[in-house]
Image (cartoon, grey):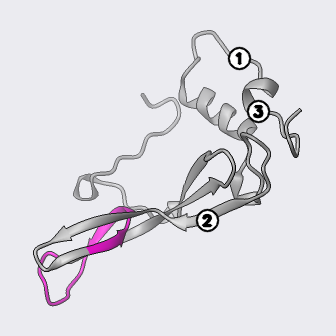
Amino acid sequence: MRRNAVPRAAETVPRRGGDDAGSVRDVEWYAAAMGDIREGLCPSCGHDEVIEAPLQQLVHYKSGDTISPIGVVWQEDQGFFADDATPRNGIQMYVCRSCGFTQLFTESPGTIPIGEAHKTRLIKSGSR
């Protein structure tokens, strides 16, 4: 068995089939069995070193390049420049230092605004 033996989800979770295979319920069931890398242990290979970092992007401006955090939605700033915006609900990534397995988590998911103005919509299980 692998170092720090943590079984892979595919090894411990039987394959589900039937009419709901691939549904939201199936995905939630798999995610619950997968494990949370934020606990410091890779759910894929069992390695015990995990890197935490904000998800970022390189943005090109006429005045130069900058690194900007990535958020689920953006809030317009009332600053000097009319096109300034600040990301809301930032995304943190957790990366296994051995195999590279990565999980992303959004900060304060319950505060994400829903609606066309934010280009978001709420999907509830069974509402498709």
The residue furthest top is: 18
Q: Which region shows up in magenta?
A: 66-83
Q: Could you tell me if the residues under marks 3 and 1 are in contact, i.e. CB atoms within 8 Å?
A: no
Instruction: Determine the residue positioned at 33% across, 51% down.
Output: 120
Quadrant of the rendered structure where residue 76 is? Answer: bottom left
Name the quarter where the N terminus is drawn. top right
Mark 1, residue position: 15
SS of the residue at dot 3?
loop
- Amino acid type at circle 1 is Arg
Q: First in sequence, mark 3 or 1: give its number.
A: 3
Query: Residue 114 shows which numbered tag?
Result: none
Q: In the image, which is nearer the foreground, mark 2 or mark 1?
A: 2
Q: Is residue 86 visible?
A: no
In this image, 38 relative to 11: left or right? Answer: left
Residue at the disc numbered 2: 52
Of the two numbered discs 3 and 2 on the same chain, state the one appearing first in sequence. 3
Q: On screen, 10 above or below 76? A: above
**Quadrant in the picture for the C terminus:** top left
Mark positioned earlier in the residue sequence (2 or 1): 1
Does the magenta-highlighted stretch encompass residue 67? Answer: yes
Crowd around label 3: few <14 · some 14–19 · many ≥20 (10 Å): some
Quadrant assignment, res 82: bottom left
Q: Which mark is residue 8?
A: 3
Q: Foreground mark, 3 or 1?
A: 3
- Left or right: 63 with respect to 119? left
Task: Give the amino acid type for the residue marked by disc 3 in the picture.
Answer: Arg
Amino acid type assigned to the residue bearing label 2 in the image: Glu
Query: How many numbered marks are there?
Result: 3
Along the viewing direction, whichever of 55 and 16 lies nearer the viewer: 55
